[in-house]
Amino acid sequence: MHSVPVRIRITAAVVLLVGLALTGAGFVVYVLQLRQIDENVNAAITQELEEFKRFQVESSEEFADPAALIRANLRSNVAGENELFVGFIGGEWAFAQQNRYSDHSTYDDLRTDPALAEGVNRVLPEGGSFRLDTELGPTVVTVQPVSSANETADGAFVILYLLTSDQDALGDVMRTYAIVAFLSLIAISATAYGVAGRLLRPVRRIHATAQTISDTDLSRRLEVTGNDDLTDLSHTFNAMLDRLEEAFDGQRRFLDDAGHELRTPITIVRGHLELLDADDAAEVKTTTSLVIDEVDRMSRLVDDLILLAKTRRPDFLRPDWLDVGELTDDLADKVRGFGDRTWSVDHRGRGSAFVDRQRITQAMLQLVDNAVRHTEVGDSIAIGSIQDDDALRLWVRDTGVGIGHEHQQVIFDRFRQVDPNSLPGSGLGLSIVSEIARAHGGDVGVTSVLGGGSTFTVTLPRTDPQGRTS
């Protein structure tokens, strides 16, 4: 079962919200227009009643009965549009006046409408208004009592206001609104569908890129344009791919390096064991010593490879603020046991730095061990540290054989040993130093001249992850 595409769901949600908004707006318009019709009707009726009362007060004629008064008023007053004036005498329809420009041929039908007469008689003698459905549609009926000489309300001036035309006009307006709203909804739907497509384009690119990524090719990246949340998502996705590629490359290098470097000692051990004469005690002793030495070398090699693999993990470092001078003194105390060399401290830095003490010590001791390997008894080896506003620099300087310029850029690669006459090692020491420096956000470099010694310098940023300095 296929899921509904996100683009369609977004469009449907927009259409639903807009549809509800338009429906709500239409309902509000309808209610307000109904209220306006009521206000207009009440105003028209109030005006007619005031004119009738004013006629009663201002007229100079003497009227014998209510019928004469109502007739006289109708002769001087003209019914407005949608209005009908009726004289009720003795509880019955007596005469009426309609708008001269209106064709209300069915007005006469109201004469025989019992509901109208019953309603008028019900509100007499106090008078009042009520609504009534008649032959001409919904009608507002207003009754103004007219008293005779004995002050008995035996007549009434009745105003009928027909609501049909006003309601028909409102219906036309609402139908027009519905058509416009429907067409607007279609236009908004098309626009929302197009906008959703553009907004989701980066997501589709992410999907397409993710489908092309495999464990053998993590090089694909998203093209990042714009400045919005989806752009941030693209940056995050690319950063995730960078981390994955780095992790896979680390695993691949680990497997390649382990397979390559462990093959030789395994072959040596296998060969000697196959040729071993178990009856020759001296040969057994020699072979056992050789096998143990090769196993130890493999163990050290595996430990170094595991350490290199861990350098890419976020928990590889546990940095904290430490005193640079104390770190330098601690290193000076530890290196004196590495060999019969002339040891010294070039410079003792001051201040604090945000680093992992154990890892930095490990890196510096590895550089010292490397210096010992390439110097002779009596040669000088010095360590030092200095710190400025931006960086901490730690170095190991020796007066050994030096390194040729052509080798200075590759000695930090794994398993690179440029001096075949040096003491045996895994070829991973300088790689470990480089990775420790990189994990701190720094680097390691070398300056050297053949026959003139070498200086290895580890440069580390002074700030913590929040950019604060000591």
Image (cartoon, helix red, strand yellow):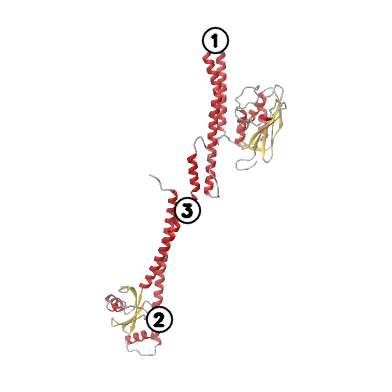
Disc 1 marks which amino acid? Answer: Ala
Q: Nearer the viewer, residue 321 or 295?
A: 295
Q: Residues within 10 Å of mark 1 (few under 14, many from 20)?
A: few
Residue at screen point 47% across, 40% down: 211
Element under label 3?
A: helix
* Residue under numbered circle 3: 194
- The mark nearer the N terminus, 1 or 2, is 2
Q: How many marks?
A: 3
Q: Nearer the viewer, residue 314 or 231?
A: 231
CA–CA distance in space, label 1 to label 3: 86 Å
Disc 3 marks which amino acid? Answer: Gly
Q: Residues within 10 Å of mark 2 (few under 14, many from 20)?
A: few
- The mark nearer the N terminus, 1 or 3, is 3
* Residue under numbered circle 1: 281
Residue at screen point 49% across, 37% down: 214
Whole-percent x and y of residue 112?
27, 78
Disc 2 marks which amino acid? Answer: Glu
Q: In the rendered image of this protein, does residue 156 appear above or below residue 275?
A: below
